[in-house]
Image (spheres, helix red, strand yellow):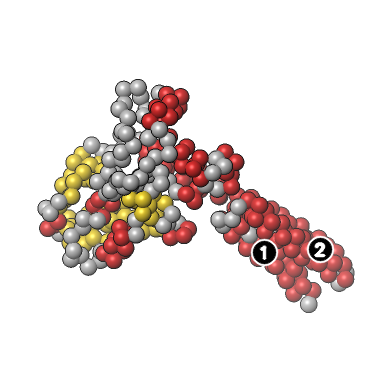
């Protein structure tokens, strides 16, 4: 009986501590997360207190103290691991995105797609792949929360080689290739591709018809990124969009010609009715102060 009591009052706090993972990775605002976490911490402290009380009743204070201390230490350790893991993942995602956007030497681009095949520009080497040599194409996708596309890729197999070609949406013009794959490949998920392009909406940030399930497939911006923390700096959603547009359309040298809010894309069409919330003068002033 004594052992059973110790197991119950030691395991229950650990289960609740593990359950706290959803607080760290949920979409709620900071106030709601703190409220949830506080309630669960109080539950754990109550269980640890009961653990100690039962230890006194059965005359084993040492076991009760060991259980209470062990549960508390494990809880603190687990929460710290959760927090540092979350921070690490965020830093890695930011590093990856920055590398993709800024690494000029790592050219990854779909140059052309036609009836004969497609051309990939990889590290300044142009490689042509003939459709006749492609034996299978498999779509691989990974979604973040709310079914937002995080990564989506294509895996090609060829009749004249045992090697595979794997490309993903980090490649420029990837979606241009995706929407122009010929019919007839058994492993290819054509229904997903049709649904994706059928449900595209105009992106408020860049003006292309490229917004899918809460995120732009072209500029990677999202209205969901306007969090409680962001609202401190940008009180309205319009303020947030303006800030993102200044970054999107900025020029990075005095000699660079301003693109007049036109995004060059083979994958997506420009919405002719879309208008930016910032002016050319504002973009150039932002560029002068932050990019030149």
Q: Position of residue 238 (x, y in %)?
A: 49, 43
Tell whether label 2 touches label 1 (CB within 8 Å): no
Q: Between residues 271 and 228, which one lies in front from this camera angle? A: 271
* Residue linked to disc 2: 49
- 86 versus 40 height, above or below: above
Q: Between residues 10 and 249, which one lies in front from this camera angle? A: 249
- Single out the residue that lies furthest toward the front: 273
| Dot label at residue 281 | none
Apparent side of residue 28 relative to residue 106 in the rendered image (left or right): right
Q: Determine the residue positioned at 76% across, 57% down.
A: 69
Q: Between disc 1 and disc 2, whose residue precedes?
A: 1
Q: Determine the residue positioned at 12% across, 54% down.
A: 115
| Dot label at residue 16 | 1
- The local secondary structure at tag 1 comes to helix
Q: Position of residue 28 (x, y in %)?
A: 59, 55
Q: Between residues 30 and 53, which one lies in front from this camera angle? A: 30
């Amino acid at each position: 009986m004594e052992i059973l009591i110790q197991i119950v009052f030691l395991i229950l706090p650990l289960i609740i501590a593990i359950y706290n993972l959803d607080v760290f990775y949920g979409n709620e605002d900071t106030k709601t997360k703190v409220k949830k976490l506080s309630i669960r911490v109080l539950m754990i402290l109550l269980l640890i207190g009961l653990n100690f009380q039962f230890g006194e009743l059965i005359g084993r204070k040492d076991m009760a103290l060991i259980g209470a201390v062990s549960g508390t230490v494990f809880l603190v350790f687990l929460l710290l691991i959760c927090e540092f893991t979350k921070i690490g993942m965020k830093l890695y995602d930011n590093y990856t995105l920055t590398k993709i956007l800024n690494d000029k030497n790592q050219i990854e681009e779909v140059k052309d797609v036609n009836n004969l095949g497609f051309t990939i520009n990889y590290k300044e080497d142009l490689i042509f792949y003939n459709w006749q040599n492609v034996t299978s194409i498999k779509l691989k996708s990974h979604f973040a929360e709310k079914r937002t596309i995080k990564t989506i890729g294509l895996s090609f197999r060829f009749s004249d080689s045992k090697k595979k070609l794997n490309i993903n949406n980090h490649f420029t013009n990837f979606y241009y290739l995706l929407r122009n794959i010929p019919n007839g490949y058994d492993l290819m998920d054509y229904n997903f591709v049709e649904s994706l392009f059928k449900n595209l909406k105009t992106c408020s940030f860049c003006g292309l018809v490229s917004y899918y399930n809460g995120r732009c497939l072209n500029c990677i911006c999202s209205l969901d990124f306007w969090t409680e923390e962001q609202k401190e700096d940008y009180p309205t959603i319009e303020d947030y969009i303006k800030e993102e547009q200044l970054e999107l359309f900025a020029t990075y040298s005095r000699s660079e010609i301003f693109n007049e809010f036109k995004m060059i894309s083979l994958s997506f069409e420009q919405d002719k009715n879309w208008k930016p919330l910032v002016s050319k003068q504002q973009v150039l002033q932002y560029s002068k102060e932050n990019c030149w």
